[in-house]
């Protein structure tokens, strides 16, 4: 499967729009296209999935390691993989290139197309691009694409950039209202919230068919190294209920597949609409935007009671970020009103005006628990504006700069905390959850 990475100088450079537009344009040509997102972002893969009808996956070197992201690449099938970078091309952990889009490009042998948004520049833009090309070697930047650009500016810039950088300029996207995607504090709104998303991407793909050198862009992928994999799922040995609706939608596709590969049958349910948990041997409450649906979650009393009884009764449970907030006694909204939640944990969730403990961290377990073993170093990630009066004390978190703090409520049947975990790395967290759920099933016989 040929591969291409879409990158930019910074966030807001148009990566998601260009990625989705190219996905639709090449799918129209009959190519089977797969999508990937560099880094821990949950929202951009939702856009890829909506555009392609194929689950998009994350490639995160910090959370997964090199072997992990190579394995993730083998989960997809098709003719062309389009990888979307995160932030700026070289932006990684703690001011380094670690886990950056550039490092993913190097590890996976994937050429990069640099999206550039020209603003009051001509030759200086070439200097910036040359700086990117020379900052690390090999840069793996194979071509340029101009975003939000007029035809006259494109005609002016293309010969300058090609002469000064030696890179082909493979088209442009004009200013388009359809290419403006609404954002909120965690980034773009989710794909399901944009009713006319398909029409918007169609319009972008139409423009790319007219203004982009699609054959030239595709030719950049010719040197990609092939990666293959063969895997069959085992017979299910347990059932795990997974919360999935508008309030809870942040799941890595690899996490769900890792559960299936560990012998779990997944049954999806909605804490917003269903009245109780489905029959299951384990529970997975992912992140999302529960703060947008506090009244509906609170008024679904029977679901809250079902979750309380099950988790308090020892049902193996993983609750990350939004799921962690849902397990609390209550959540206070931005108007100061409190809404009762499941009540498994004693805290009150509340809003803040800035990101809390943002970024990558390493979890240092001091005891064995549902997902962890004492002495392990577990990579994780936080990205949330909300906090809690009781964040837990059972685990230690360490940032790359050395700062540490305690967090989380964990035990033999529970992981409940703000940090998100990726189960596509070397630590068998999915298997451990499935093992615990299988014991519950055995106990029912």
Image: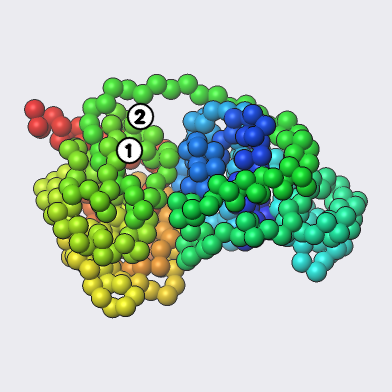
- Secondary-structure class at tag 2: helix
Assess disc 1: are there few (<14), some (14-19) or many (≥20) residues with their C-alpha within 10 Å of its C-alpha.
many
- Of mark 2 and mark 1, the one earlier in the sequence is 2
Q: Position of residue 115 (x, y in %)?
A: 71, 53
Q: What residue do we see at 50% from left, 37% from top? A: 53
Task: Find disc 1 in the rendering and name its residue.
Answer: 430
> Splitting the image into 4 quarters, where does residue 298 fall?
bottom left
Q: Residue at x 63, y 56 (%)?
A: 179
In the rendered view, does 334 fall on the left or right side of 86?
Answer: left
Q: For the view shown, which residue lies furthest in the bottom direction?
A: 336
> What residue is shown at x 74% (from left), y 56% (from top)?
174
Residue beneath disc 2: 261
Image check: 223 left or right of 292?
right
Q: Say what secondary structure mark 1 lies in.
A: helix
**Discs 2, 1 touching: Cβ within 8 Å:** yes
Image quarter where the C terminus lies is top left
Image quadrant where one finds the N terminus: top right
């Amino acid at each position: 499967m040929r591969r291409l990475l879409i990158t930019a100088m910074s966030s807001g450079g148009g990566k998601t729009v260009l990625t989705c537009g190219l996905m639709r344009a090449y799918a129209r040509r009959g190519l089977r296209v797969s999508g990937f997102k560099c880094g821990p972002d949950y929202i951009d893969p939702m856009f890829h999935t909506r555009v392609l009808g194929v689950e998009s996956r994350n490639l995160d070197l910090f959370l997964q390691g090199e072997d992990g992201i190579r394995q993730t690449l083998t989960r997809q099938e098709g003719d062309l993989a389009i990888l979307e970078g995160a932030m700026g091309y070289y932006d990684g952990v703690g001011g380094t290139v670690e886990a950056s889009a550039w490092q993913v490009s190097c590890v996976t042998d994937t050429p990069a197309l640099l999206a550039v948004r020209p603003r009051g520049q001509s030759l200086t833009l070439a200097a910036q691009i040359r700086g990117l090309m020379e900052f690390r070697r090999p840069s793996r930047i194979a071509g340029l694409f101009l975003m939000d650009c007029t035809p006259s500016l494109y005609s002016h810039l293309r010969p300058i950039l090609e002469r000064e950088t030696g890179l082909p300029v493979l088209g442009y996207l004009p200013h388009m209202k359809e290419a403006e995607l609404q954002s909120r504090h965690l980034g773009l709104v989710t794909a399901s919230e944009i009713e006319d998303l398909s029409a918007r991407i169609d319009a972008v793909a139409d423009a790319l068919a007219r203004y982009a050198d699609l054959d030239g862009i595709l030719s950049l992928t010719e040197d990609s190294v092939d990666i293959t994999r063969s895997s069959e799922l085992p017979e299910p040995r347990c059932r795990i209920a997974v919360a999935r609706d508008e309030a809870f939608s942040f799941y890595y596709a690899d996490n769900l597949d890792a559960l299936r590969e560990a012998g779990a049958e997944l049954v999806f349910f909605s804490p917003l609409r269903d009245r109780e948990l489905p029959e299951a041997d384990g529970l997975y409450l992912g992140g999302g935007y529960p703060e947008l649906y506090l009244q509906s979650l609170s008024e679904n009393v029977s679901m809250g009671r079902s979750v309380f009884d099950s988790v308090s009764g020892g049902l193996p449970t993983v609750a990350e970020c939004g799921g962690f907030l849902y397990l609390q006694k209550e959540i206070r909204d931005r108007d100061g009103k409190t809404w009762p939640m499941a009540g498994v944990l004693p805290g009150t969730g509340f809003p803040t005006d800035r990101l809390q403990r943002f970024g990558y961290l390493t979890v240092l377990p001091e005891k064995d628990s549902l997902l962890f073993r004492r002495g392990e170093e577990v990579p994780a990630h936080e990205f949330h504006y909300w906090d809690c009066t009781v964040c837990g004390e059972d685990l230690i978190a360490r940032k790359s700069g050395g700062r540490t703090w305690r967090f989380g409520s964990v035990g033999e049947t529970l992981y409940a905390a703000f940090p998100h975990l990726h189960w596509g790395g070397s630590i068998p967290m999915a298997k451990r959850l499935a093992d615990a759920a299988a014991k519950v099933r055995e106990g029912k016989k």
